[in-house]
Amino acid sequence: MASSVIAIDGPAASGKSTMARMLAERLNIPYINTGSLYRAIAWKALKLGIPCKDAARIADMLETTRVRYAVPPEGGNPDIEIDGAFPGALLRTQEVAQGASDVATLPLVRRFTLDIQRDAAKRQLVVMEGRDIGTAIFPDAAHKFFLTATPEARAKRRLSQGGETPDGATVASVAAEIAERDRQDSERAVAPLKRADDAIFIDNSGLSIEETLQLLLKHVKGNES
């Protein structure tokens, strides 16, 4: 029996977070951003002065770390609660983003987060996005999508977001950083970024947000009919 998950995977700035959030709204179901889980771990490590690639110290930190997806006091979609706090926007910095990429390569972190992610989808159908949802976390997801776009298109999106790019960044410089991030994520030994064999592939470089959303809805509702 398929897991009650609509999995949306893809590289950084591919639009998967926006699409996952909007798809969940249209379907009136919860949206789970798994990237926030790794960002929260990196955020705590950085606060404690722990290098995000230091496996031994990260392991010690996780011994006293409590993380879960929960509805924030203000309501809305489930968000990351770590040690009783909801970091929210504090997770959307360039430093935390890089730290999240580093901690995500650690096998001990992947093991730590596996049950947290699976527990979030136990009660009802959810939209969950990340880099390995349809391959490592929910290989039996009810629906699988892999979103991507050219590095240049993704660089323009990242620059328009603010907060995750340094001052003076250009489309060319951000595109180069994104391409390098893709290489690292695709070549890492643990849960590499890749498209599941049965995932619907969508290159949205030349598509609007609404056009991309309609493609997702078409496949989800078509498979349910």
Image: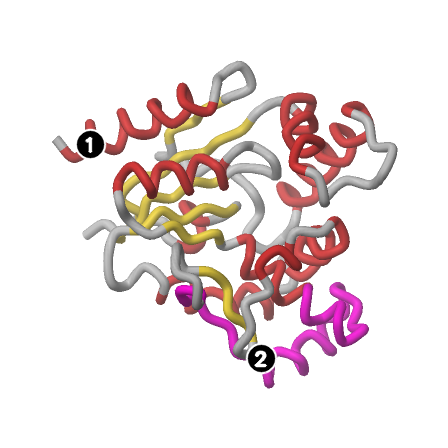
**Any magenta on residue 16?**
no
Image quadrant of residue 214? top left
Where is the C terminus found, in terms of image quarters? Answer: top left
Colour mapping used in the image: secondary structure
Extent of the magenta region:
43-72
User: Regarding mark 1 in the picture, which secondary structure is present there?
Assistant: helix
Residue in view at x 76 percent, y 54 percent: 95
- Please name the residue that numbered disc 2 is placed on: 65
The CA distance from mark 1 to mark 2 is: 40 Å
Total numbered badges shown on the rendered structure: 2
Mark 2 crowdedness (10 Å alpha carbons): few <14, some 14-19, many ≥20: few
User: Mark 1 or 2 closer to N-term?
Assistant: 2
Image quadrant of residue 205? top right
Residue 65 at x, y percent in the picture: 58, 79
**In the shown orientation, is residue 111 left or right of residue 62?**
left
Amino acid carrying label 1: it is: Asn
Residue in view at x 30 percent, y 39 percent: 143
Residue in view at x 43 percent, y 68 percent: 73
Question: As displayed, is residue 154 above or below residue 63?
Answer: above
Q: Nearer the viewer, residue 211 or 143?
A: 211
User: Regarding mark 2 in the picture, which secondary structure is present there?
Assistant: loop
Q: Nearer the viewer, mark 1 or mark 2?
A: 2
Residue in view at x 38 percent, y 44 percent: 7
